[in-house]
Amino acid sequence: MHVSLATTDPDLQKISPVLLQLRPQYTEASLVARIKLQQQSGFQIAYVSEDSDFLCVARFLIGHKLAWQKYLYVDDLVTAESRRSTGAGKCMLDWLKQHTRELGCQQLHLDSGVQRFGAHKFYLREGFSINSHHFVFTNLDADQS
């Protein structure tokens, strides 16, 4: 297994079937367009491949916060359903941890949907801890108070 950064349109098209398993609300074209837009603001994508198969994808961003100092934040991390429990996710997390260190970041962060119990077990096994609740308010138009 090998980790690479997706930097070209053909790279994005190759990894999109894996990423669409996590984000099925997009088409391949709309997903690639959204990723290209996000890359303009610093998002990067890493992927794990083996031979000609694309096994795991992670979208991430480097940032600075008062609470976290310099950090790497993983926005999406998905292993192809057919390749889960084969080491691809661990390969990606090991690479992300090393990349975080190489960039001089103090922390590596990610969020995971509350329903993703298998992912939570994996992250805990890989040394992550649960240290906060992430709250979101999405109905801004209805709240005119």
Image (cartoon, helix red, strand yellow):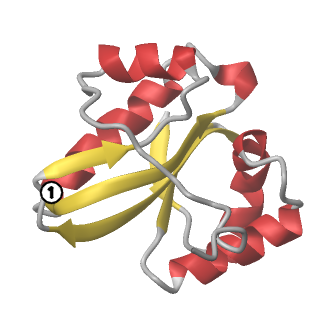
Image x and y of residue 89, in percent: 48, 29
In the displayed structure image, the side of residue 19 where residue 112 appears, left or right: left
In the rendered image, the residue lying farthest to the front is 145
Q: Tell me the element at label 1.
A: loop
Q: Is residue 65 above or below residue 126?
A: below
Q: Residue at x 22, y 53 (%)?
A: 100
Image x and y of residue 95, in percent: 33, 42
* Quadrant that contains the C terminus: bottom right
In the displayed structure image, the side of residue 19 where residue 45 appears, left or right: left
In the rendered image, the residue lying farthest to the bottom is 40
Image x and y of residue 60, in percent: 43, 59
Residue at the spot of label 1 = 68
Q: Residue at x 35, y 55 (%)?
A: 73
Mark 1 crowd level (few <14, some 14–19, many ≥20, 10 Å Cα): some
**Residue 102 falls in image quadrant:** bottom left
Q: Residue at x 25, y 53 (%)?
A: 99
Q: Is residue 86 visible?
A: no
In the displayed structure image, the side of residue 29 where residue 138 appears, left or right: left
Q: Is residue 103 above or below residue 24?
A: below
Q: Is residue 90 above or below residue 51?
A: above
In the foreground, 24 or 28: 24
Q: Is residue 12 visible?
A: yes
In the foreground, 39 or 129: 129
Q: Is residue 131 above or below residue 86?
A: below
**Residue 137 falls in image quadrant:** bottom right
Q: Residue at x 56, y 77 (%)?
A: 38
In the foreground, 49 or 96: 96
Image x and y of residue 116, in percent: 58, 23
Amino acid type of the residue that numbered disc 1 sits on in the rendered structure: Trp
